[in-house]
Amino acid sequence: MSTKNLNADNHVEEHHGAPSGIMRWLLTTNHKDIGSLYLLFSLLMFFIGGAMAMVIRAELFQPGLQIVEPDFFNQMTTVHGLIMVFGAVMPAFVGLANWMVPMMIGAPDMALPRMNNWSFWILPFAFLILLMSLFMEGGGPNFGWTFYAPLSTTYSNDSTALFVFSVHIMGISSIMGAINVIVTIFNLRAPGMTFMKMPLFVWTWLITAFLLIAVMPVLAGAVTMVLTDKYFATSFFNAAGGGDPVMFQHIFWFFGHPEVYIMILPAFGIISQIVPTFSRKKLFGYSSMVYATASIALLSFLVWAHHMFTTGMPLAGELFFMYCTMLISVPTGVKIFNWVATMWRGSLTFEVPMMFSIAFIVLFTIGGFSGLMLAITPADFQYHDTYFVVAHFHYVLVTGAIFSIMAGAYYWLPKWTGNMFDEKLAKTHFWLSLVSVNVLFFPMHFVGLAGMPRRIPDYALQFADFNAVISIGGFAFGLSQLLFVAVVYKCIKGGEKATAQVWEGAEGLEWEVPSPAPYHTFETPPTIK
Amino acid sequence: MNNNEYEKYYVPSQSPWPIVGAIGLFCIAFGAGNYVNDIKNQVTGFGGYLLFAGMAITIFMLVGWFRNVIDESMSGKYSKQLDRSFRQGMSWFIFSEVMFFGAFFGALLYARVFSVPWLGGASNNAMTHEVLWPAFEAIWPLTKTPSGTVTEAMGWNGLPLINTIILLISSITCHFAHVGLEQNKRKQLKWGLGLTVLLGCIFLFLQVEEYTHAYQEMGLMLSSGMYGNTFYLLTGFHGLHVTLGTIMLFIMFLRIVIKDHFTPENSFGFQAASWYWHFVDVVWVCLFIFVYII
């Protein structure tokens, strides 16, 4: 891949550099500024949601009720989940997309730059509303991030309305962000950048954006029905009026299952960028990666009821959703094997992004396997709503999505800031995270299989030892993340200057522009041969 | 590949509108959240005022934002490529709207195929029926809910049929206007578009009549169980979309009549509004079939 017209300097008279002051960030239409805003916002949310996880783990450190009231415990599990899903993981991926997609496809910016700003700036307000609801009389949302009816309708407190409207804003933000990404990819590729030449991060984001546009409106529908059930006497989720609380779960998980792929497909894309770089080889099986991603996305619409095996569905439904779910392991397996095959006989080096990527591949696979166990209907009857489920989705979301975001952040930080980060500190961050995250989540499998229910502030005495270990792992993991902030801060402040290519084996348009990338990357598109 | 069409991609410099819009949306959401609680708890609070302030800010934002975009478009800053961005963005937005309606159609079908028959004892639910509401009869339209709320079903002939015909004709007039624009027949464009707006207004008027009739004479209310729920949320959200579509078309009408905007080559704003109108029309046809007839 070679490029021309990369030098943006001769266009300075048209576009000035970045304006200064707070107004730069409030009014910006620049994809790099907006990407940075998304990433910093998600980091802040990661710590707020993390603090709530610390409250949960502190309460669960020993059996009995010590620190918080059960109702507040429920609020913590609810808002922790909402913040991590909608405030930390998704905005982090959108931030990475904002920064990297235009640079990877040779676009001048995102396709709709003003809307891009709007989709970011409504997010902080959405979370402001959600966090404010915690301080209302009667407390914040306490029905779990899945807000199952009738917990969120008949039995919920006054904060429900604020919850509903803040989720609406999050949805609007996601839909606009996704429309922007999809239009940028369809319409702003540089000449010669055909679809099957696009970097995998761009491909996975294209498919993620499609999923977002398809399912976020369904979530909006679900919260709207919760609102009318609670406040306007409808009975969508109330059998007395002809509705059904189980219908809530169908609608929610029709959104919710594609949603979990929304949180993992971009991660696949990031790993598919990083592994070839540090293996100094082309990605093994590029086209199969693309098709596998598309298959996962399509299948994600056909598996929602595997979250509901214990609701008493007809047998045919149980079987259909079980087999469809297990089918997903095929394209996912293709991806895992392709990453391993990419590393096979490569000249590997183990810089920090690669370390996180390898940890991702191993630990995400563990999460995938426990997912397969959960997919088996009769087995799920036992695992349902236990800590085994908590272990499963934290393996795919923390050691999956979050590790990939960390990997991506370390991979592209030198390109963003122009400085290399403190490798020693970053490696400390990696090793501490790796060890503590497994101390945190691995024993959850054991207590889950032994029958410890999730979302309960107290537990039977036989779970005490493991829970103490889990909590220690949790505190260690939480504290380790402060090192990440230190690395990022030091990297922004200064450090060894990065070259344009940064990493020896890195290939692609983003590595051919200087580091830090100029404020406006491609005034005229490069030609890809 | 022709490089020229890529050279002018217009990236606007800073814009105040998004942050104004974010504040507007915040006021709407926070205001509405407090307002519904105020209604439920029967207190007077700041919610309603904040909601209206938010709407005012949002309308202010939309006017300013669109003025900017129209000015940029009319001064020739936009390329064909940017026009494609707008078109694709609008198409994906309409797709997201389809999925939004999908959630409510899904609820309707679920109620009819599963929850109502099950409450009546269908499939393996004989005991459910026996234990919960043994007197309940599973029929659709659900004129008597399990807990005993009684209502009347809205027939399809009469106002709904008239409204269907009105919307179908309006889609044709809208297309007629579009053809007029493409062939540079400005008179046909103006008449077609004006008629479409008029038909949209008549539709909305009749919809209000229908609601009044339902509430005052038939006892069909939002709280009348699953039939009333799906009826009002589906037709209500559709009505909101018709309102929005009518406003969009009316603004296009003003732009054409007063400012003589749009040419066969530069017509995105008009096309977006007309696509939206056709989408709203298709939703109504589905509504007419699934809510009224079947």
Image: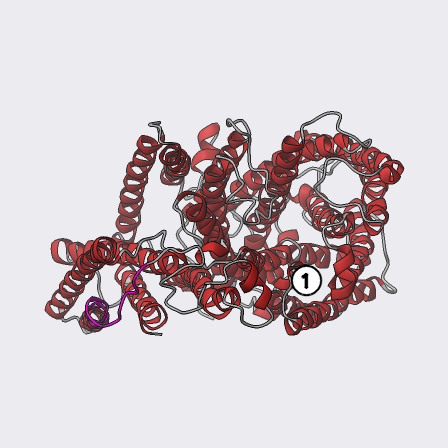
Residue B250 in sight from this viewpoint: yes
Q: How is the image coloured?
A: secondary structure
Quick check: A172 above or below A254?
Answer: above
Q: Please state the horizontal and vertical placement of residue A32, each as a whole percent of the image.
A: 54, 43
Q: Give the range drawn in magenta.
A: B151-168
**What residue is at 25 percent from the left and 53 percent from the top?**
B215
Q: Give the labeled residue for mark 1.
A: A309
> In screen coordinates, is A484 left or right of A101?
right
Numbered disc total: 1
- Residue A492 lies in the magenta stretch: no
Quick check: A501 above or below B85?
Answer: above
**What residue is at 80 percent from the left and 67 percent from the top?**
A337
> In screen coordinates, is B147 left or right of A106?
left
Q: In which quarter of the image is the C terminus of chain B?
A: bottom left
- For residue B32, what is the image quadrant? top left
- For residue A321, what is the image quadrant? bottom right
Tell which of A395 and B130 is nearer to you: B130
